Amino acid sequence: MAAAQAVEEMRSRVVLGEFGVRNVHTTDFPGNYSGYDDAWDQERFEKNFRVDVVHMDENSLEFDMVGIDAAIANAFRRILLAEVPTMAVEKVLVYNNTSIVQDEILAHRLGLIPILADPRLFEYRNQGDEEGTEIDTLQFRLQVRCTRNPHAAKDSSDPNELYMNHKVYTRHMTWIPLGNQADLFPEGTIRPVHDDILIAQLRPGQEIDLLMHCVKGIGKDHAKFSPVATASYRLLPDITLLEPVEGEAAEELSRCFSPGVIEVQEVQGKKVARVANPRLDTFSREIFRNEKLKKAVRLARVRDHYIWP
Amino acid sequence: MMEEDQELERKISGLKTSMAEGERKTALEMVQPAGTDRYCVKFVLHKEDHILGNSLRYMIKKNPEVEFCGYTTTHPSGNKINLRIQTRGALPAVKPFQRVLNELMNVCQHVLDKFEASIKNYKNQKASRNEPTF
């Protein structure tokens, strides 16, 4: 009975000891455990696998994937970061730049601006193709000139009052449709994602006048093409109390974990600790610094439950 | 997420067609180490890295006929991986490799389906609670 439990633990949990982590690697391959059939079975995988979306809004997505192995989950994570294509500014044709920001710095900043355009509707540009056609390029124009404000107060020192157009934002970028793009994309659908990103600052007499070409690319080529700010996952924490913890020790225990993980309940006049919501824990291992309590708790992670925040 | 499921499928189907045609822009080479028979084969996959390497290795090891499977990257800045498969002697080593490419495509397809269903479910739930969706 204990042996079977130990085998189950080895197969399904990554255990966090005081000084190290055990059972890290996947071991459920055929032949490793007697009595288990570990050969790949698509039906068994489909039966056990599930995806639950926890939270989704315009900028972030949190979901759980249960029943998949680290190799494939990590492949998804790497693909999200490096191989999902997006559109970003690649070539900048500078007609006039009398600002303090150098041409190449300005071009670098422009490349990092996220563009709202569905990359699936565009093709990759061929190698050595200089001009760019309507099927693989988006064009944007940025033309801003800073002037002195004639109506400013005599002794004002606030730049917002003294100068006009002294801050260049992404909302100053205008889209120039190529070919039949004007028919395919209604007005206002192709634009930078945010219109309040500061590109450069100007003073009277300085001007920025340039043309930008956006192409489709992947993150492996340059990080500006990566569609996600960050994509990561963590394993679901699994906290087990090996012995009942009561009284003052229960309060101490609940302080060792993130708030909400351990709940202290009043049972028959005594305070008893109970694991309420292990998902919230960040595993700071504070419990191991407490001599009395560290033997009462087993910290582990469920091997095939991935939380993608 | 959906896009990257499709990316993985696209990569694997690209590998499969290149195996079928023998060679297509040198995406894949098969090398027989000297002194062995066809049960032990090394594949060199160009323009690939840990993404495919680790997933293929995991799926191939799940096959009970495979005695050994491992992959390495030749150099961190290089763009190819060596994948070595050794079978117990019942199948030529190419067979598990071909099977696994199909299996991985099925896995990705299934993940994609489940993911899309879950997103739709979430949106429906939010709509039924009259919260704004996007």
Image: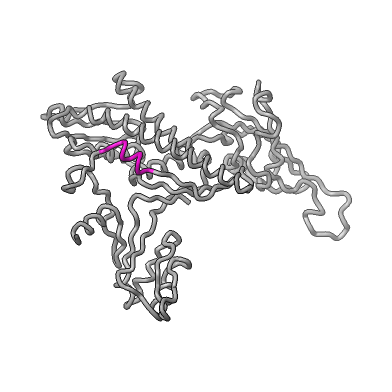
Residue positioned 17% across, 47% down in the render: A35
Q: Is residue B104 left or right of residue A266?
A: left
Q: Is residue B86 left or right of residue A241?
A: left
The picture quadrant where one finds residue A136 is top right
- Residue A166 position (above or below residue A247): above
For the N terminus of chain A, the quadrant is bottom left
Between A279 and A132, the one lying in front of the other is A279
Q: Is residue B60 left or right of residue A66?
A: left
In the rendered view, how is the structure colored?
A: one colour
Residue A197 point in image, percent of width and height: 65, 47
Residue positioned 56% across, 31% down in the render: A215
Residue A165 point in image, percent of width and height: 77, 46
In the image as oriented, which residue stretches furthest toward the top? B21
- Residue A44 position (above or below residue B16): below
- The answer, for residue A95, to whether it is visible in the render is no
Residue B27 point in image, percent of width and height: 33, 26
In the image as oriented, which residue stretches furthest toward the left? B35
Between B19 and B114, the one lying in front of the other is B114
Q: How many marks?
A: 0
Q: Is residue B76 left or right of residue A137?
A: left
- The answer, for residue A167, to whether it is visible in the render is yes
Residue A304 point in image, percent of width and height: 34, 49
Residue positioned 53% across, 26% down in the render: A123
In the image as oriented, which residue stretches furthest toward the front? A268
Q: Main secondary structure of the magenta part?
A: helix
Residue positioned 53% across, 35% down in the render: A86
Residues rendered magenta in the picture: A40-49
Between A135 and A287, the one lying in front of the other is A287
The picture quadrant where one finds residue B7 is top left
